[in-house]
Image: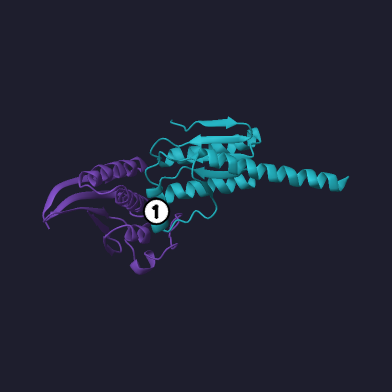
Chain colours: A cyan, B purple
Amino acid sequence: MDRIPILKLGGVLIVTIQVDMHDRLALALEEDLTARIAGTGARGVLIEISALEIVDSFIGRMLDNIAAISRVLDAETVVAGMRPAVAITLVELGLELTGIRTALNVERGLAMIRDRLAEDDDLESARARHDD
Amino acid sequence: MPVTTTEVLPIRTSDDVVRVRQAVRVRAVGIGLGLVDQTKIITAASELARNTLDYGGGGEVRLDVMQEGARRGLRLSFVDQGPGIPDIARALTDHYTTGGGLGLGLGGAKRLSNEFHIESTPGVGTRVTIARWK
């Protein structure tokens, strides 16, 4: 069966969706990402969707699920590169993707994840100092 | 309304939903719809094809390219012989679902189309027709 490759860059998992998503592929991606987050201890997931011609409620739900699972596993998800026509259509469809952080492109998405991780690390070291 | 081209596609598996999207895209480009309008009708078609599959137990879609004077349009009719929808007004309400979906399909497809029509008879089936004009 086809699978969408997952790359690891530092503590971030990166997925680029380049094909028209069918159901099995979407479910396989959810499973694979979950396993990789748990296996690698990744703290961020970046999903790049600039090749996607549409996002319907099924794909929207997949993105929401991935973000929710990641959050439970202590990782931050950012969806990057949504086409403007897709964004306009999503809003009209009524899909707000409230659980997902979005970025204009991969570069900004990675910066978003790194900022978030840096904040967490600062908090942790502040707590560690306080404990001392 | 004069129909210039007609195509019928089955909706029996989730791969068929992908094929329906691709066929709708070809027709939408063919009648000269802009990128946003293409995206809207393909997304609406994806929602309705999935409804036909998940709630109607499968069926088919008919794609009609229409010409009215200088105007061209694309009409899509999704037909199933499933259980039907007892309360259409409720089914059109956002976030209402009898399955595991988000409940945005029907209302969303309506918002994404220029024309929307639904007929459903419990025990007989459902037909949803949408159109988008250039």
How many numbered circles are shown?
A: 1
On the image, the x and y values in percent for residue A120 come to 70, 45
Q: Quadrant of the N terminus of chain B?
A: bottom left
Front-lying residue, B5 or B122: B5
Q: Position of residue B30 (x, y in %)?
A: 21, 44
**Mark 1 residue type:** Ile
> Which residue has dot 1 on it?
A88
Up/down of B122 relative to A119, above or below: below
Which chain does the numbered disc 1 sit on? A
Residue lying farthest to the right in this orientation: A132
Q: From what the image shows, is residue B86 above or below residue A96? A: below
Front residue of this view, candidates B2 and B31:
B31
Camera-side residue of A95 and B8 = A95
Tell me if A124 is positioned left or right of B8 in this view.
right
Q: Is residue A128 visible?
A: yes
Image location (x, y in percent) of residue B111: 34, 61
Question: How far across and how far down the image is residue A48, in percent?
Answer: 48, 39
Residue at 67%, 42% (x, y): give it. Answer: A117
Q: Residue at x 79, y 46 (%)?
A: A126
Crowding near the residue tagged with mark 1, few <14, some 14–19, many ≥20 C-alpha atoms within 10 Å: some
**Along the horizontal axis of the image, is B78 left or right of A99?**
left
Q: Is residue A74 visible?
A: no
Quadrant for residue B70, please give it. Answer: bottom left
Q: Secondary structure at mark 1?
A: helix
